Amino acid sequence: MRVIDKRPKVSRRGFLGAGGASLIALSVLPGGMIVAADQSWAVTAKTLKPETFATLVQMSRDIYPHDRLNDGYYAKAVQVFDEAAAKSDDSKAMFEDGVAGLNAAAADAHGVSYAQVGWEEERVAILHSMEKSPFFQAVRGGLITGIYNNPEVWPLFGYEGESASKGGYINRGFDDIDWLDQV
Amino acid sequence: MATFDLSDDSVVVVIGSGAGGGTVGAELALKGVKTVILEAGSRHEIPDFINDEWGSFGQLAWLDKRTTSGDWRVATDFSGLPAWIVKAVGGSTTHWAGASLRFQEHEFKVGTTYGDVPGANLLDWPIDLKEMEPWYAQAEDRMGVTRTNDIPGLPGNNNFKVMKKGADKLGYKECHTGRMAINSQPRDGRGPCQQIGFCFQGCKSGAKWSTLYVEIPKGEATGNLEVRPNCQVLKVEHDASGKVTGVVYADKDGNQHAQKARVVCVAGNSIESPRLLLNSASSMFPDGLANSSGQVGRNYMRHMTGSVYAIFDKPVNMYRGTTMAGIIQDESRNDPSRGFVGGYEMETLSLGLPFMSAFLNPGAWGREFTTAMDMYDHMAGMWLVGEDMPQEKNGVTLHPTEKDQFGLPVPNVHFDDHPNDVAMRNHAYRQGAAVYDAVGAVRTFPTPPYPSTHNLGTNRMSEKASDGVVNRWGQTHDIANLFISDGSQFTTGAAENPTLTIVALALRQADHIASEMAKGTL
C-alpha cells in the first residue's frame, strides 16, 4: 500500500552566535531572538517578553508532546499567542501573568524556573495544578489549531490534506490496505 | 431564474434550502407552483468548496450565536456550538455524508412498540412505513441512492475494509458499503465518486446529492423558483383570521423586507425552525405561532451518537475516500434484551488530522492524547448513530438576555441524555471496540458525541393537536397555511440517518400542497 514518508525534511537555517540565557533546548539571545539549541530554527518575540515566549514553547510541548515534532512547530504555534498579545493588553497580561505563575510554581516545587525543571512529568504536574485556569485553556485551545492545523506537520503524521486537485484517491490508494488477509 | 415581487401574495415562501426546504421548494416549482426560497446563508457553488476542514467550517457552518445547557458533553466541550450544521444554499446537504436509509416499520410506531419508557415523551407517528414507501422510492430515485434502483454500491475504502473484516469475525451479517446518495456510476448528469475524502466539506466532484446543485437548479429551470441567498427570516406574520400572510427577513446588508405569501413552509433545521415560531409570537399567539400544544421547541432529539476510533500496528489511511464508506446494521433492531429500546447503526467515519485533534477527546492533553495522534495514519474509525428518546425538557428556548445581530433572542439548546441513550451508547462503544479488536486493534477510543448533525423533533408530527405541532402532512395543527418541512417534524428519531426521510416527507408534502392549492382549499 502507498504509505507516506513521515520523516522530517532537514532544513537547518544556521543561526550562529548563540550564548544567551539557556533554557532546555532553546536560547534567548540579546534582542529577543529565540534560537533552537541546534540552531535549526529561530523566532523573534514581538510583544511578549522573549523569556515568556520561550517558556510558552516549552509549555506547548508539554501539553501536546510529539517527539517527532521539533520545537520550531511549537514556536510557530506560540507566535499566534504573541500576535494575540499585540492586539490586546488583556491577552498580553494573561500570557505574561500565566507564565509568571508557572515559574512561581516551579520555583516553589523545584527551585528553578518552569523551563528548567528537568523532567516532563514534573512540569506536567505543574500544568495539572493550573489546568482549569483561563490561561491554560487559552494555550491548550490555541494549540489545537496552532499545531494540528499547520499543513507543514500533516505529512509528519501521515495525513495528506487536500486531494481534489490530485483527482481524489480513486487511483491513489483509497482501497490499498494489504495486511487484512493476515488477520 | 424567476424573480417575484415582495407584494406577490400568490407565492409559496420556503424558509431554508436544505434537505427539506430545497426539496419542497424545487418540487413545488416542478409542479408549477410559484415559489420563493429564502436562505439565510450564501450561495457557494462546487468550485468554491475547500478541501480544508477548518477553512470549510468557516465557509459553511452556522456560526451565529447559540447557547447550550444540560448534561450532554457538547455543552462543556463546545458550549457555543450545539450543532454542526450549515448556513448556505443547500443547507446541510452540502455537509452531509450521504447515508440514505429508510426507517424500519416499528420506528414509526415506537409509542406502541416500546411501551412506557419513564421520562420519554414517546408517541406514534400518524403515518406508517407502508404509506411512506412510495415516497421513499421516489426520494431514492431522485437522490440516486446506491443499492436501490439497480445502482451498484460504492467500492469499499481502507476504513471500510477494516470494519468489514471485524464485522465478519464477529459474525455480523449486514455489513456493506451502505445505501449512499453518492453516485457510484454516472447518473443524473453527475459523475461518479472520486474518493476525494472531504464529503463533509462539500463534494468537489458533485457525486454526492445536494439540493444545492441537484434539486434547486431543476426548480430554477422551470421559471417558477426564486432562491434568495443571504436572506434570514426574522418573523412569520399573520392576519386577524390567524392565517399567515408572509414573512419579514433581513438581507445581507441587514435591511428588512416583507415578502407576502399564500403558504409558508418553515425548514430552518430543528434549532432555527422552532426559534422562528417562538420569535413570531403576537398578541393573538402569545406563546409563538402554531404552539397551542406547547410542544414547539420541545422533544429535541439529536440521535444517540458517539464514535470509536482504533489504532492498529499497521497503516490504514482511513482519510482516503468516502467519509462514510460502510455500515453494520445488525444492531439497528429493537431488542430490549440488550438493556435498551431501539437500535443503532455503525457507520465508518474519518476525520482529517485537524478535526481529529479537536474531536478525538475534546479537552484532552498530554501523552495519552498525543501518542494516539502520533498513530493517525494507523487509525480506523466508525460513528455510532441510534435512536434517542424524545424528552419534553430537551429543546430549544429563547435566551432571556442574549440577542443576535438583528436584536432577536438567540436560541438555547438544552439536552440531557436519557438513561436509554446512555445504555445504548455504552453498548455501542463495546461493540464498536469489539469490531476493531477482532482485527487486532492495539488501542481503541470511545469518542464522545460531536456537536449535533441530526437535529430533530422540535415541531413534532402528531395525530392529535394537543400532542404535537404538525399533522400528517407537516401542516401545523393551528394554522392551515403554515407548514414545517424539515426534520423538526419528526415524531421520533429512529436509528437511521434522517435525510432520506426528510426528503421523502418533503416530496409528499409538496404533492399535498400543490393539490390542495389546485383544489382551492389552501
Image: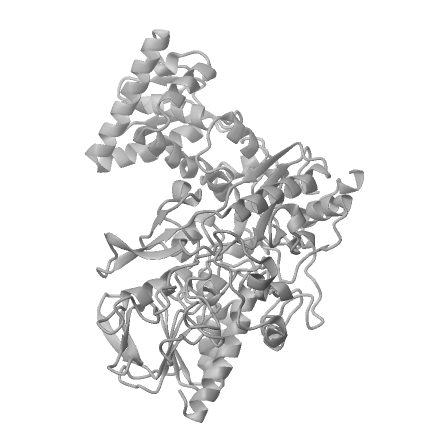
Q: Residue furthest bottom?
A: B519
The residue closer to the viewer here, B317 or A125, is A125
Q: Does residue B293 lie above or below A161 as drawn?
A: below
Q: Nearer the viewer, residue B5 or B383?
A: B383
Measured along the vertical axis of the image, is residue B415 above or below residue A84? below
Q: Is residue B513 left or right of residue B324?
A: left
Q: Is residue B104 visible?
A: no
- Name the quarter where the N terminus of chain B is drawn: bottom left
Could you tell me which residue is drawn at 40 percent across and 74 percent down? B476
Residue A147, percent across and down? 44, 35
Percent of width and height locating residue A104:
29, 14
Q: With respect to residue B63, does A99 lie above or below? A: above
Report the colour scheme: one colour
Residue B14: percent from left, percent from top: 39, 75
The answer to whether one can see residue A68 in this image is yes
Q: How many marks?
A: 0
User: On screen, B7 above or below A119?
Assistant: below
- The C terminus of chain B, quarter of image: bottom left
Drawn side of residue A73 relative to residue B307, left or right: left
**The one of B244 and A110 positioned closer to us in this rendering:** B244
Residue reaching furthest to the left: A89
The location of residue B225, given as percent across then percent down, is 41, 81
Determine the residue positioned at 44% across, 23% down.
A62
Q: Residue furthest right?
A: A182
Nearest the viewer among B280 and B479 is B479
